[in-house]
Image (cartoon, rainbow, N blue to C red):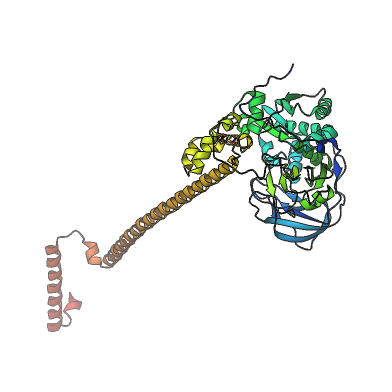
C-alpha cells in the first residue's frame, strides 16, 4: 500500500531543473591534486583541533585534527604527503573570510591502514558508534551536523532517509543511489540499529526513476519503506519533509529529533557504511560539476581539500565563458569568489555558469505587493512583511512574525517579480537579532557579576564583623581566665571566699594584734615562746 502523503504549504516548481547532462555520466574519480587544504571547520559546532605539525609526514586516513569537546568533527588526511602549513586560507563560505586550515603537499594517494571488509555484525554498538565518531562523518545534505551526535537518541520513532535533492542542477545523490545503492542500504541498517528505530522511511522524489529502481531493489525484503514524493522545491528541507511524510508540523524553535524523528541524507548513510565496513574516514565525497561554462559536466569523486580551481580545470571550464561559480544549487547556493578555496565535506555541487545562465545581473525593483512570495513560502510566513520590517529596521516586528522559522530556502526570492534578494534581508535581520541577543546576554552576565560582587562584599563585611566580635569575646574570656588563675594563687581568698568583708578584716586585725603581742612578749622574755 502506498504511503499516505500529507503535503506541505507553498513550494515552487523551477522551470528548468538542469540535472542533465551531469547526472547521465557515471561517477568519475578525480586525479590526485598536488596539494590539499583541509578547513578545521567543515561542520556545525566547534572547529577541530590540529594534532600534527608543519613538516610532518602523514598517511591517507590519518587523523590530522581531532574533534573539539562538545559538537565537532575530526579531520583526516585524504592522501599521503607532508603538512605544508597550518593557518588561514580562503574557504568556500558566505562571508569570503579566510579560515583556519591544514595544508598537505601530496606525494601519492596511498592506502588506508585497515581497508579490509569488516562485517558490522561482529562489532558491538559501542564500537560502531566510536568508528562513526572517529571517521569525522557529518550530515552531507548541507547541514554538516556531526552524525555521531544524533546517534545517542534512543526511542526513535522514525528514521527518515532524505533522498529528495530538490534544488536544480544538483545530482550527486541521484548518481550515488544509481551506482552504490547496496552500500547506502547497509549504512541505513547500521543507523537504524544504533537508533533502535521503530520505522524507516526512504523518501525519494519522482524525478529520479533510475535511482528509485536501484534503491527499491536494494531495499527489497527489508524493513525499509521506500516513499516516492512529488518533485517540488523545497521538499528536501527537514521540516517540510517531516510534514509531508508524517503530517507533523515541527514546532517553532524545535528540532525534529525532539519528536523522535531522526533524518539522514543518502550520502551520509554511504559514508557510515564505509566507516564501519572499511574503517574509512570521511576523506572524499561526490561533487556535481555543471553549468554552461563546463565542457565535461558530471559527478566527480573528489578528495576533501581539493582546490575548486583544480576540479573545474579537470571538468574543462571555458574561462572565456565563465561568469561566476556557485557552490550548492542556484537557489540556496553561495558565490565563490576565490577559486583557490577547497572542496569541503559540505560541497555537493559547483555551478560554473555561462552568460545569462543565472540571474546575476537582474536589478532589484520596488515591491509591487503581488503576494507571490507568501504563496511560495513553505514555512507559512509573510515574506513581504518580513522584508518591509527588516528594511525599515523594525527587527522586533520581524521577530514577532517568526523570522527565526525562515529556513532561507529562497522560494520567495525565486518567484519575486521585482527580483528583491529577500533571503539576504532575512539573513541580515537574523544576524541583527542574534547580535542583540548576544548583547542582552552580555548585559545580563555583567549584571549577574555585579550582583555577585556586591553579595561577596556584603558577606566579607559580615564575616569581618563576626571575626572582630569573636576576637573580643576571646580576649574577654582570656582576661577572665587569667584573673581566675590569679585568684586561685591567694589561699585566704580561696579558703574563705564567702566570708563577709568586715569579718575578713576583723580576722586579719586579730591576727595582726596577736603577732604584735607575740613580738612584745619575745622582747621582754626571750624564752616565752619556748615556754608556751
Ligand atoms: S513577491 Fe516580491 S514584489 Fe511580490 S509581494 Fe513579495 S516581495 Fe513584493
Ligand atoms: S526564504 Fe524564508 S520567507 Fe522565503 S520562502 Fe523560504 S522560508 Fe519563506
Q: Nearer the viewer, residue 297 or 420?
A: 420
In the rendered view, does 185 fall on the left or right side of 416?
right
- Split into 4 quadrants, where in the image is the C terminus? bottom left
Any part of residue 175 in sight: yes
Q: In this picture, is 228 found above or below 278?
A: above
309, 363: nearer the viewer: 363
* Residue depicted at 72% across the width and 26% down the height: 201
Residue 282 found in image quarter: top right
Residue found 81% across the figure and 52% down from its top: 310
Viewer-closest of 331 and 217: 331
Residue 317 position in % (x across, y down): 81, 48
Q: Please indicate, yes or no, whether residue 155 appears anywhere in the rendered image.
A: no
Picture mark count: 0
Q: Position of residue 119 (x, y in %)?
A: 84, 36
Give the answer, above or below, for where 445 lies relative to 5: below
Percent coordinates x, y for residue 464 in the rendering? 36, 59
Ligand 1 falls in quadrant:
top right
Residue pushed farthest top?
A: 1
195 to 31, vertically: above or below: above
Query: Which quadrant, please, contains the N terminus?
Result: top right
Q: Position of residue 142 (x, y in %)?
A: 69, 40
Amino acid at each position: 500500500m502506498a504511503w499516505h502523503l500529507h503535503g506541505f504549504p507553498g513550494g515552487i516548481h523551477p522551470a528548468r531543473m538542469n540535472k542533465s547532462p551531469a547526472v547521465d555520466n557515471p561517477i568519475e574519480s578525480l586525479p590526485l591534486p598536488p596539494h590539499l587544504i583541509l578547513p578545521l571547520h567543515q561542520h556545525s559546532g566547534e572547529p577541530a583541533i590540529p594534532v600534527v605539525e608543519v613538516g610532518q609526514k602523514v598517511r591517507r586516513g590519518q587523523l590530522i585534527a581531532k574533534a573539539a569537546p562538545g559538537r565537532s568533527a575530526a579531520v583526516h588526511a585524504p592522501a599521503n604527503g607532508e603538512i605544508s602549513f597550518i593557518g588561514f586560507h580562503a574557504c568556500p563560505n558566505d562571508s569570503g573570510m579566510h579560515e583556519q586550515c591544514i595544508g598537505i603537499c601530496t606525494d601519492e594517494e596511498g592506502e588506508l591502514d585497515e581497508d579490509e571488509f569488516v562485517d558490522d555484525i561482529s562489532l558491538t554498538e559501542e564500537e560502531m558508534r566510536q568508528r562513526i565518531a572517529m571517521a569525522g562523518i557529518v550530515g552531507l545534505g548541507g547541514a554538516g551536523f556531526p552524525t555521531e551526535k544524533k546517534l545517542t537518541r534512543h526511542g526513535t520513532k522514525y528514521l527518515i532517509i532524505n533522498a529528495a535533492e530538490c534544488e536544480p542542477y544538483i545530482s550527486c545523490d541521484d548518481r550515488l543511489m544509481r551506482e552504490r545503492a547496496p552500500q547506502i542500504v547497509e549504512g541505513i541498517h547500521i543507523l537504524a540499529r544504533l537508533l533502535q528505530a521503530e520505522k524507516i522511511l526512504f523518501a525519494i522524489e519522482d524525478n529520479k526513476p533510475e535511482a528509485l529502481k536501484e534503491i527499491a531493489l536494494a531495499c527489497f525484503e527489508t524493513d525499509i519503506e521506500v516513499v516516492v514524493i512529488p518533485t517540488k522545491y523545497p521538499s528536501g528541507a527537514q521540516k517540510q519533509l517531516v510534514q509531508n511524510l508524517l503530517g507533523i508540523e515541527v514546532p517553532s524553535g524545535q528540532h525534529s529529533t525532539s519528536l523522535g524523528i531522526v533524518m539522514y541524507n543518502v550520502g551520509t548513510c554511504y559514508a557510515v557504511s564505509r566507516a564501519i565496513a572499511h574503517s574509512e574516514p570521511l576523506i572524499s565525497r561526490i561533487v556535481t560539476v555543471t553549468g554552461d561554462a563546463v565542457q565535461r559536466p558530471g559527478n566527480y569523486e573528489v578528495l576533501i581539500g581539493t582546490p575548486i580551481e583544480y576540479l573545474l580545470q579537470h571538468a574543462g571550464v571555458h574561462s572565456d565563458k565563465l561568469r561566476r561559480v556557485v557552490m550548492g544549487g542556484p537557489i540556496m547556493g553561495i558565490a565563490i569568489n576565490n577559486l583557490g578555496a577547497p572542496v569541503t565535506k559540505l560541497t555537493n555541487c559547483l555551478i560554473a555558469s555561462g552568460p545569462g545562465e543565472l540571474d546575476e545581473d537582474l536589478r532589484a525593483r520596488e515591491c509591487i505587493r503581488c503576494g507571490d512570495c507568501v504563496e511560495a513560502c513553505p514555512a507559512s510566513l509573510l515574506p513581504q512583511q518580513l522584508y518591509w520590517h527588516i528594511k525599515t529596521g523594525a527587527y522586533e516586528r520581524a521577530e514577532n512574525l517568526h523570522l527565526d522559522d525562515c529556513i532561507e530556502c529562497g522560494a520567495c526570492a525565486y518567484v519575486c517579480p521585482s527580483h528583491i534578494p529577500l533571503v539576504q534581508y532575512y539573513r541580515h535581520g537574523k544576524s541583527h537579532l542574534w547580535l542583540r541577543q548576544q548583547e542582552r546576554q552580555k548585559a545580563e552576565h555583567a549584571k549577574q557579576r555585579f550582583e555577585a560582587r556586591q553579595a561577596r562584599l556584603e558577606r566579607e563585611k559580615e564575616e569581618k564583623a563576626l571575626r572582630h566580635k569573636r576576637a573580643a569575646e576571646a580576649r574577654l574570656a582570656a582576661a577572665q581566665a587569667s584573673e581566675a588563675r590569679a585568684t586561685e594563687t591567694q589561699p585566704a581568698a580561696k579558703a574563705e571566699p564567702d566570708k563577709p568583708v568586715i569579718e575578713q578584716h576583723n580576722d586579719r586585725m586579730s591576727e595582726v594584734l596577736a603577732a604584735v603581742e607575740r613580738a612584745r612578749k619575745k622582747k621582754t622574755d626571750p624564752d616565752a615562746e619556748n615556754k608556751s
